[in-house]
Image (spheres, rainbow, N blue to C red):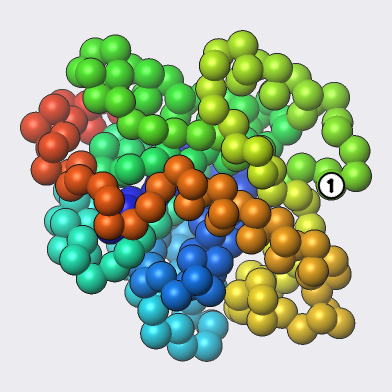
Amino acid sequence: MAVITFANTKGGAGKTTAALLLTTELLHRNYRVCVIDADPQRWFSKWYEGAALMPRLSIETYVSSTTIQKIVHERRSQWDFVIVDLPGMQSPLLASAVGLSDHVLIPIQGSSMDAQGGAQVLDLLRYLDRKAGIRIPHSVILSRVNPAITTRSMQAVKRLLAEQEIQVLDTPIAERAAFREMFDLNRPLRKLDGAQATGAEKAILNAEALANEVLTLVQPGTTLDRSLMRRRDLSQYETAA
Ligand SMILES: Nc1ncnc2c1ncn2[C@@H]1O[C@H](COP(=O)(O)OP(=O)(O)O)[C@@H](O)[C@H]1O
Ligand SMILES: [Mg+2]
C-alpha cells in the first residue's frame, strides 16, 4: 500500500478535486483505494454518498490526528492506495498525515493566496527534514490552470517554486467545467454524460496524465510502513503544527 496526501492549508486550492481525479483514475486501473476524508466539511464523502456503488473504493471520515495513524495501519494490507484529503486550514492533522505519507501532493493555484497555503505545507516538510531528518517526498501540482494561456501569476508561481528547487509535476490540472460537474452530478469523470460534460474528453486525458505521472512517483506494495518508522519522531511536531 502507498499513502498519498493532498495538502494545502488554503481552501479552494483544488485538493479535493485532485484527490477525486486520482482516486477514480486508480479505480479505473483496478487498484483498491481507501480515501481518508479528513476535512470536517466532508466534500469527498458527500460526493461518494451520492455516487453509484464502487466496490474497490472505501471512505473513512471523521478522523483525528490520533485516529488517522490507526486507520492507515489497519488499511495497509487490504488497499493498494490510501488517499488522504486534508482540510483547507491549519490543523494537527497536517503533520500526522504527512508523517504517514509516501508522497505529499500540494495543489497550488496560480494566485498568491493559494501559494501561501502551499508554502505552509512546504515549510512543515522542510522543518521535519532539517530538525528531525524526516524526508517526505512531495511535489506541487499546479491546479486550475487556464488550458489556453499561461497567466502571469502562474508564471510567477512557477518561477518561485523553481528557485526553491521544489518538484512540480509536469501535469498541471486545467480549469475545466467537467471537473466541477463530477461533484455536481456525483459521478466519476469517465461516467459523465458527454452532453453535460463540457470538454470531458480533454478532462479525461488530463486525469489520465496526472495518474500516470503520480504512478511513476508512488507505486503500491513497494513502500515501507512509514507510520511505524516515523511514529516516535513525529509525535512532537503534531502539536506544534
Ligand atoms: N481544475 C478545476 N476546474 C474547475 N473547477 C475546479 C477545479 N479545481 C477546483 N475547482 C472548483 O473549485 C472549488 C474548490 O476546489 P476544491 O477541489 O474543493 O479545493 P480544496 O479541496 O482545496 O478546498 C470547487 O468548487 C471545485 O469544483
Ligand atoms: Mg477540499
* Quadrant of the drawing holding the C terminus: top left
From the viewer's perspective, is residue 231 above or below residue 54? above
From the viewer's perspective, is residue 67 above or below residue 180? above
Which quadrant of the figure has residue 226?
A: top left
Tell which residue pokes out farthest to the left in this image: 232
Looking at the image, residue 149 sits to the left or right of residue 5; the answer is right
From the viewer's perspective, is residue 205 above or below residue 90? below
* Quadrant of the drawing holding the N terminus: bottom left
Which quadrant of the figure has residue 177?
A: bottom right
Q: Which residue is at the front of the view, 47 or 232?
A: 232
Residue at 27% from the left image edge and 57% from the top image edge: 221
Q: Which residue is at the front of the view, 210 or 230?
A: 210
Q: What is the x, y in percent for residue 189? A: 66, 72
- Classify 10 Å Cα crowding around label 1: few (below 14), some (14-19), many (20 and above): few
Residue at 38% from the left image edge and 52% from the top image edge: 219
Looking at the image, residue 20 sits to the left or right of residue 200; the answer is left
Q: What is the x, y in percent for residue 70? A: 15, 56
Looking at the image, residue 135 sits to the left or right of residue 211; the answer is left
Amino acid, disc 1: Pro
Q: What is the x, y in percent for residue 160? A: 65, 16
Q: What is the x, y in percent for residue 148? A: 90, 44
Say if disc 1 is inside 8 Å of ligand 1: no
Residue at 42% from the left image edge and 20% from the top image edge: 123
From the viewer's perspective, is residue 64 above or below residue 201? above
Q: Give the residue pinned by disc 1.
A: 147
Looking at the rendered structure, the secondary structure element under dot 1 is: loop
Q: Which residue is at the front of the view, 220 or 75?
A: 220
Residue at 11% from the left image edge and 43% from the top image edge: 228
